[in-house]
Image (spheres, grey):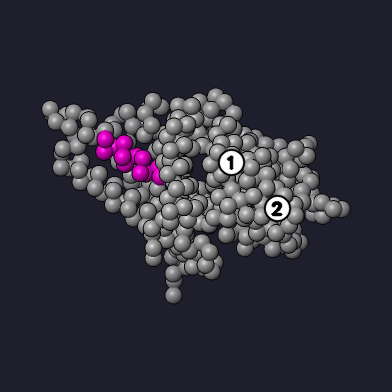
Amino acid sequence: MDFTLSDEQQLLRDGLAKFLSTRYGLESSRTAAKSGPGWQPEIWRAFAEDLGILGAALPEEVGGIGGGPVEVMVIAEELGRALVIEPYVDAIVVAGGLLRRARSPLADALLEKVATGEAIVVLAATEAQSGDRWQDAHSTARPDGDHWLLNGSKIVVPHAPLATHLLVTASTAAGLSLFLVDLADAAPGLALHGYRTIDDRRAADVHLHDVRAALLGADGGAWESVAQARDEGAAAVAAEAVGNMRKVLGDTVEYCKQRQQFGAPIGSFQVLQHRMVDMHMELEQAVAAVYLAALNLDVDARQRARAVSAAKATVGRAARFIGQNAVQLHGGMGMTEELAIGHYFKRLTALQYEFGSTDHHVARYAALTRP
């Protein structure tokens, strides 16, 4: 298995890293998250126009570059390293993949707007009744002329307050189906109750009452595509977590070189050196697991699911270990708003539950590897 990036992929990483180091500040992003609109629209436009990363993994026929899972992994890791709050994984990886596989003129037209940053599409799939079992949707849809009417509720829909469109899973007589809701035309039956999550993202609970929607794909045939989108999202947030952990570990090592105790840097104490070596080993295992997931996203569903669950479980364990130890080594400063480490720790905590919790993926991996 070759873990070496191509020249083009390395250029993508270097260009994005340089952009984020010069134009993406932690203070400005936290200000936007806490007291502004919840994100920085000018950064999103720059992602589309200056860097082209919004279309990096989208087909060329809709204005993309035609990249694949490795390009997504590279982008997600760099975004994680800079603690970017803009909705790349949810709007581009997850929703973009669902629209790409829908293979309809409506989906293709919307994908063109996604690639240019004009449209932000997110998936609404989680329900209070079914939790991680997205296939057991209690929301329903019924035909109404050329459209469908949706009824039900979705919870913790990531970035919904920023979105222009929602992709909603709902049950029909034929089974699980996927629907597109244009938020500009959905009133008055659509209600969004938005809030800020612990990691400074925006999310919303969505309530639907006879909301007009367009069917994407075959009636009753959505689960295969939704399951793939969920695995792609899990692999992408695992890569994002790797970027987070690289930053957290690097900052912790630098802090331990500078912090003095008993007349010497605390990094000179052997017991703390052992702790940081353990953190480094957890990170390296997570990196290998993310590569495994990225390189197995285009194979058969069972092998893909096994690789993704292995990565998500490995990254979840590493994120918990590295995050907690980084905070402990920083002392009380580790949880303050002024220090970056506290913000990274919150994101690493949230990442453990996105697209299936660590426990969920451990159980799924066990089921997939059982004789």
Q: Quadrant of residue 258?
A: top left
Horizontal and vertical percent position of residue 2: 39, 63
Going 51% across and 56% down the picture, which residue do you hit? 69
Tell me, yes or no, whether the highlighted magenta stretch contains residue 249: yes
Q: From mark 2 to mark 1, how far is it between C-alphas?
A: 17 Å
Residue that sits furthest to the bottom in the current view: 371
Marks 1 and 2: in contact by CB < 8 Å? no
Q: Note whether 291 is above or below 201 in the view shown.
A: below
Give the residue type that dot 2 points to.
Answer: Asp
Q: Which sits in the foreground, 138 or 125?
A: 125
Going 20% across and 46% down the picture, which residue do you hit? 274
Magenta extent = 243-254
- Would residue 74 appear left or right of 188 to someone viewing this image? left
- Which residue is denoted by mark 2 in the rendering? 108
Horizontal and vertical percent position of residue 167: 67, 49
Horizontal and vertical percent position of residue 30: 48, 29
- Would residue 291 appear left or right of 49 to someone viewing this image? left
Q: Quadrant of residue 314?
A: bottom left
Q: Which sits in the foreground, 28 or 320?
A: 28
Numbered tag placed on residue 48 in the rendering: 1
Residue that sits furthest to the front in the current view: 7
Residue that sits furthest to the left in the current view: 263
Going 74% across and 61% down the picture, which residue do you hit? 219
Marks 2 and 1, the one that precedes in the sequence: 1
- Would residue 357 appear left or right of 181 to someone viewing this image? left
Give the residue type that dot 1 points to.
Answer: Ala
The answer to whether residue 155 shows anywhere in this view is no
> Which quadrant is home to the C terminus?
bottom left
Mark 2 lies on a secondary structure that is helix
User: How many residues crowd around disc 1 within 10 Å: few (fewer than 14), some, or many (20 or more)?
Assistant: some
